[in-house]
């Protein structure tokens, strides 16, 4: 746990792998391409609305700091399978995929146009071990889990609702093992999400947690006594 903190969470060293990815992010953040996006999650008050790609890149996905942390976690843990719920433009996926080049990376996204753009970004970045599946998590998650068979790292980053978060976590559990790591995004985004985080901390399969303030890590490690950490970033 301390090594994970030092190597992945508190490490601020730049890495050459970030360069082309972040160059592309800067470019996409300026894009004025307009999409009619269907948001199936709790992130929007509108089911369908016009949004600029640049705005989605600036507000709707992982920041550079969060992305670099995703990369370092994947690099440190070297999971063989990674599942992401919520692809958006594919930048979080790209950091994870670059950090774990041997992993099978599956990402789920409800909006087909976002999924298409994510694929284009991965092509540009020469990432060929990531795959996006289009559809509501409720239907795509069971099939994705069946395909993966084993879940090593799971990034829950879409549909920030209390019951949905708990349901996705429960659906993943049969495929999880003692070494599986869950990363939950936006745990303080709403009262509902904080409640979901608190509920999951008390889940009988969760033995260790790390509260990263905006995100939270859950571990199922069986040979470890129950511990809950809070990591402060300066
Ligand atoms: C916060 S964004 C994901 C950001 C991305 N993980 C990253 O790190 O850049 C959440 C995405 O989840 C998708 N989403 C939300 N609820 C969904 C659902 N129930 N089924 C499928 N996709 C959903 C949204 O369309 C949105 O693109």
Image (tube, rainbow, N blue to C red):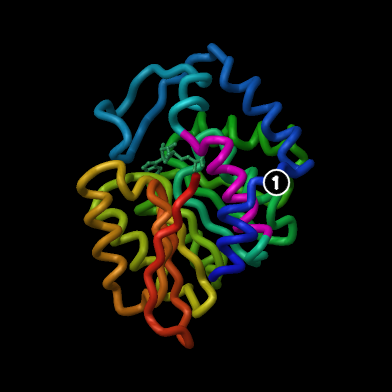
- Hey, which residue is sitting farthest bottom in the picture? 223
- Look at the magenta stretch and give its main secondary structure: helix
Classify mark 1 as within 8 Å of ligand 1 or not, answering yes or no: no
Query: Could you say where residue 25 lies in the image, as x and y percent from the top left?
Result: 63, 28
Crowding at dot 1, Cα within 10 Å, few <14 / some 14-19 / many 20+, comes out as few
Query: Could you say where residue 67 lies in the image, as x and y percent from the top left?
Result: 58, 43
Query: Could you say where residue 56 lies in the image, as x and y percent from the top left?
Result: 47, 25
Quarter of the image where the N terminus is located: bottom right
Q: Nearer the viewer, residue 96 or 50?
A: 96
Residue at the (40%, 66%) spot, across then down:
229
Residue at the (30%, 42%) spot, across then down:
189
Residue at the (54%, 49%) spot, across then down:
107
Residue at the (54%, 63%) spot, across then down:
153
**Where is residue 119, by image quadrant?**
top right
Q: Is residue 53 above or below residue 85?
A: above
- Hey, which residue is sitting farthest top in the picture? 32
Is residue 147 found inside the magenta-colored segment of the image?
Answer: no
Q: How many marks?
A: 1
Is residue 72 found inside the magenta-colored segment of the image?
Answer: yes
- State whether residue 142 appears in this view: no
Report which residue position mark 1 lands on: 13
- State whether residue 31 appears in this view: yes
- The span shown in magenta is 61-75
Quarter, ligand 1: top left
């Amino acid at each position: 746990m301390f090594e994970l903190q030092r190597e992945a969470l508190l490490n601020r060293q730049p890495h050459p792998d970030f360069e082309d990815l972040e160059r592309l992010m800067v470019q996409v953040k300026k894009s004025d391409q307009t999409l009619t996006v269907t948001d199936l999650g709790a992130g929007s008050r509108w089911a369908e609305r016009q949004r600029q790609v640049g705005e989605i890149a600036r507000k709707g996905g992982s920041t550079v700091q969060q992305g670099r942390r995703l990369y370092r976690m994947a690099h440190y843990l070297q999971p063989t399978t990674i599942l992401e719920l919520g692809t958006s433009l594919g930048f979080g996926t790209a950091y994870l995929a670059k950090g774990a080049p041997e992993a099978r990376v599956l990402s789920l996204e409800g909006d087909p146009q976002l999924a298409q753009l994510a694929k284009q970004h991965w092509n540009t970045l020469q990432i060929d071990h990531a795959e996006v599946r289009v559809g509501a998590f409720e239907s795509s998650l069971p099939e994705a889990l069946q395909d993966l068979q084993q879940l090593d790292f799971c990034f829950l980053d879409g549909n920030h609702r209390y019951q949905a978060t708990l349901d996705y976590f429960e659906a993943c559990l049969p495929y999880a093992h003692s070494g599986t790591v869950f990363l939950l995004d936006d745990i303080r985004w709403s009262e509902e999400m904080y409640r979901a985080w608190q509920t999951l901390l008390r889940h009988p399969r969760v033995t260790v947690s790390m509260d990263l303030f905006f995100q939270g890590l859950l571990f199922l490690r069986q040979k470890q006594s129950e511990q809950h950490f809070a990591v402060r970033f300066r």
